Amino acid sequence: TVKCRGRPVPTFHDLKAIGHEEKRPYICRVKNCYKSFKRNEHCIRHAKDMHGPKPKLLCPAVGCNVEVKRKDNLYQHMRTH
């Protein structure tokens, strides 16, 4: 199991070892990742977030240099100010 932003995400190899690979059939195809997901859209989101281009959205708060890739993550971060 590998942590992905604080949440443990099992790899295909972890699940295969215990015979549960069918419970998470969508596997990240990026080299050496192998994280598995129950839903295809979660796998796609993971690939964009973790393996995609660098963050594009910058927090507008003065003195905050946090960058995120998704607008919903920016809104979530802005609530911390």
Image (cartoon, rainbow, N blue to C red):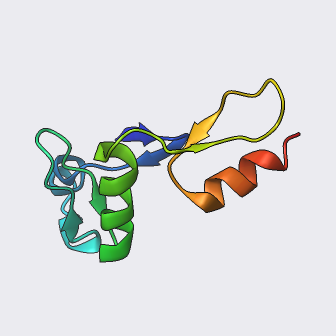
Q: Quadrant of the N terminus?
A: top left
Q: Is residue 19 visible?
A: yes
How far from the left and from the top, in percent, is residue 12?
A: 19, 54
Q: Nearer the viewer, residue 2 or 59?
A: 59
How far from the left and from the top, in percent, is residue 16?
A: 15, 56
- Compared to 59, does 16 lie above or below? below
Q: Nearer the viewer, residue 36 or 45?
A: 45
Query: Which of the 4 quarters of the picture holds residue 48?
Result: bottom left
- Compared to 1, does 35 lie above or below? below
Query: Which of the 4 quarters of the picture holds residue 4?
Result: top left
Q: Nearer the viewer, residue 19 or 34?
A: 34
Q: Residue furthest right?
A: 81
**Residue for point 73% across, 46% down:** 77
- Compared to 20, does 57 lie above or below? above
How far from the left and from the top, in percent, is residue 47?
A: 30, 55
In the picture, measured across the screen, residue 19 lies left or right of residue 64, that is left
**Residue for point 50% across, 45% down:** 56
How far from the left and from the top, in percent, is residue 55?
A: 47, 41
Q: How many marks?
A: 0
**Residue for point 82% across, 37% down:** 61
Q: Nearer the viewer, residue 18 or 62?
A: 62
In the picture, measured across the screen, residue 34 lies left or right of residue 75, that is left
Q: Quadrant of the C terminus?
A: top right
In the picture, measured across the screen, residue 36 lies left or right of residue 3, that is left
Q: Is residue 39 visible?
A: no
